[in-house]
Amino acid sequence: MLYTLLCYNKEDVVWSWTKEEDDAVMNRLSVVHEKLVRQGKLGPSLRLLPTTAATTLRSGMVIDGPFAETKEQLLGFYVIDVENLDAALEVAKELSAANPTSIYEVRPIALYVPEARPNAPKEMIKVY
Amino acid sequence: MSDLGWIHGAITAARPQAIGALLRYFRDMDRAEEAFQDACLRALKNWPEKGPPRDPTAWLILVGRNAALDGVRKQAKVTQLPPDDEISDLGDAETELAERLDGSHYRDDVLRLLFICCHPDLPATQQIALALRIVSGLTVPQIARAFLVGEAAMEQRITRAKARVAKAEVPFEAPGPAERAERVAAVAAMIYLLFNEGYSAGNDPKRAPLCDEAIRLARLLLRLFQTEPEIMGLTGLMLLQQARLVARFDANGEAILLDDQDRTLWDGKLISEGLALVDKAMRHNRPGPYQVQAAIAATHSRAARAADTDWAQIDHLYLALERMQPSPVVTLNRAVVVAKLRGPAAALAMIEPLENSLSGYFHYFGARGAFLLQLGRDQEARTAFDRAIALANTPAEAAHIRRHLDRLMASADGQAS
């Protein structure tokens, strides 16, 4: 079963983290990521730039900013391939232990379209 | 991150909104600050035991307000402070307050707070100090260190600023559209000044955090005004400049010019965010000085090597900036671009009329010396560099010019022997 794990947090807090604080969280998360890769469970995953960099299209109108003003913003997501909801929640718990202030929403995936670009990168693209 | 780390982050993030709301309530900056401090102390005691409240900002506002009111009552010996476990469960009151805070109050509270700090009656140095103290929550010793002044002097500067703001009587009613636009512009100017304080200090570790704080305030302003292209431009500009921080200085702390920087050291995350904001701003077709400066920084960021820089585009952007904001400093910057495009003689001719207005400006003589050096007019270059050194603001600036002078001396010695 394919699940997506959506990571939410308060953007103003997360983007106020010092580089050291951010690195510490990312390092703890990468331990979990590597484990998932070894177990063959990890699909694509990504981290988003803040919602101030977002543009939204609503009824054909382009508006600046995110889709909705919320207290917690979507910061990134994973796609994982696991047996069932229990297994997905296990993964979410590990991520949550590495990044305790964030909230993880587990959502089953209804349609999954794989990467179709002929020259799609095989390696992680890190903009930082 | 530990629990305490989380609490610290939540308090810092909640601060502008909470102080802004408490200020609306008490209409007195000192009382608002005290109420917030009080609420923070209770949060530090309460949250590790009971877990974080659903909405930390609403909690801090409500507890701060109640604590301050209790303080008044206590002085009047009417009632006592309530026990802390009563405060921990705010129930419906917190929910109701949280919902109201999501509305327009939020925007106007934070904007008013920022605006009060950079009120036009205050000189720029007081504006920045006040904003760092009140909005960012830096301590007086921290701010004093960043401005290289004593703590007592900084304390006095902030007290004086508060007194002057209190006398200016900023209205607490929701501002009209014109007033709001003026406030946003004043706040943007203060944030830009704050950033420049940090940026021009170079790699001084005590002052560099000013840039991070300016970016944090700009993001805050941008979240309040998501459709203002100039705020996108300002934020983008600062992100793109800050991205080069590590590459701007060598191991000895000496400045490295843009052309000579190791571009792999530039911070890709900040550049991506900065470029995204510049792109968004351009869509509005309402250009302004911050956007143009951001576009200049973006053009540099897009060049993988110095030789790839699109100087024609940068020249075009500086011309636009000159038209919007005519100033000898902008012309001087454009001359550096002209030197790249049409050679040092054209650049020198451009800056010669500026000498009167820029006679006290380090960068004027630095650029003049560099153009003369390229033209082989060593003696005149040396005179220009001597004047630049006398006007240098930081040791890194002086050291940079000193290297030019040393090279000139060496070549003069070579010719003499």
Image (cartoon, helix red, strand yellow):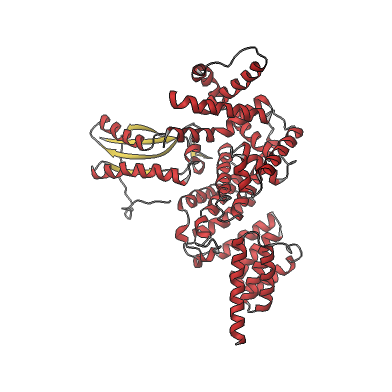
Instruction: State the count of labels.
Output: 0
Q: Please tell me in which quadrant of the rendered image residue B342 appears.
A: bottom right
Q: Please tell me in which quadrant of the rendered image residue B135 appears.
A: top right
Position of the C terminus of chain B by quadrant: bottom right
Please tell me which residue lies in front, A108 or B330.
B330
On the image, the x and y values in percent for residue B133 come to 62, 38
Please tell me which residue lies in front, B405 or B262.
B405
Q: Residue at x 37, y 39 (%)?
A: A77
* Residue at the outermost top position: B78
Q: Is residue B383 above or below residue B78?
A: below
Q: Please tell me in which quadrant of the rendered image residue A89 appears.
A: top left
On the image, the x and y values in percent for residue B245 come to 52, 55
Q: In this view, does B84 lie above or below A122?
A: above
* Residue at the outermost bottom position: B417
On the image, the x and y values in percent for residue B303 come to 49, 61
Position of the N terminus of chain B by quadrant: top left
Q: Residue at x 67, y 66 (%)?
A: B388
Residue B361 in sight here: yes
On the image, the x and y values in percent for residue B30 come to 67, 30
Residue B185 in sight here: no
* Lateral position of residue A59 relative to residue B293, left or right: left
